Image: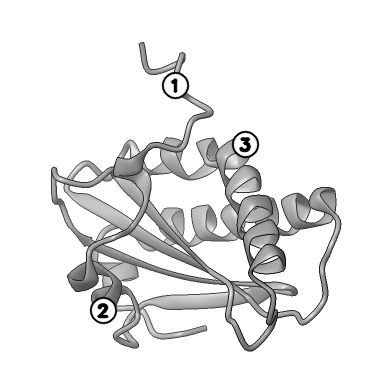
Amino acid sequence: MEHIHQFSLTKKERLCSKRLIDCLFDGKGKSFSNFPIRVVFKSVPRDTSIAQVSVLISVSKRRFKHAVNRNRVKRQIREAYRKNKHTLTEVMQCHTEENLLVGFLWLSDQLHKSNEVENKLHHLLLRISEQIRKNPTKGIENGNAV
């Protein structure tokens, strides 16, 4: 049944809780960029009310004044994540006692092509996977910004 929904992005996979968002951006998570996207991620103790990997997508109003442009960028990031999320979910299968919170932040003032956004995001997901493999359990939780 899991393979049917492999490429979906459900409500449970979206990071909506203010408490968890504050936890993600408390300065104790790791982050790095692949312009035009910055990713912030943090491991937290297991919470069954959310998916094992939960994502937040943010595009600042300062970057794009028109909502149509912000929505386009968010849609591009969502689609790229949806297609490539298996790189994270496969790694997190070993970490059953943890949840991974991930935030994608848009850094550019320009619109980019969807395939470029997907390539950049895929590269970021691979880097997150490497970090998780190198630093099992407490390594992610106690890491500083890179």
Q: In this view, does 96 lie above or below 44?
A: above
**Amino acid at dot 1:** His
**Amino acid at dot 3:** Lys
Q: Is residue 88 above or below residue 145?
A: above
Dot 2: within a 10 Å radius of its alpha carbon, few (fewer than 14), some, or many (20 or more) residues? few
Q: Mark 2 points at which residue?
A: 22
Q: In this view, does 130 lie above or below 27?
A: above
Residue 16 picture quarter: bottom left
**Left or right for 27, reference 37:** left
In front here: 9 or 89? 9
Residue 100 picture quarter: bottom left
**Amino acid at dot 2:** Asp
Q: Residue 133 carries which label?
A: none
Coordinates of residue 103 in the picture (x, y in percent): 46, 67
Q: Which residue is drawn at 22% across and 47% down?
A: 50
Q: Mark 3 points at which residue?
A: 83
Element assignment for label 3: helix
Q: Which residue is drawn at 33% across and 36% down?
A: 93
What coloring was used for the rendering? one colour
Element assignment for label 2: helix
* Cα–Cα span, label 2 and label 3: 27 Å
Q: Name the residue under label 1.
A: 5
Sequence-first tag of 3 and 1: 1
In front here: 89 or 94? 89
Element assignment for label 1: loop
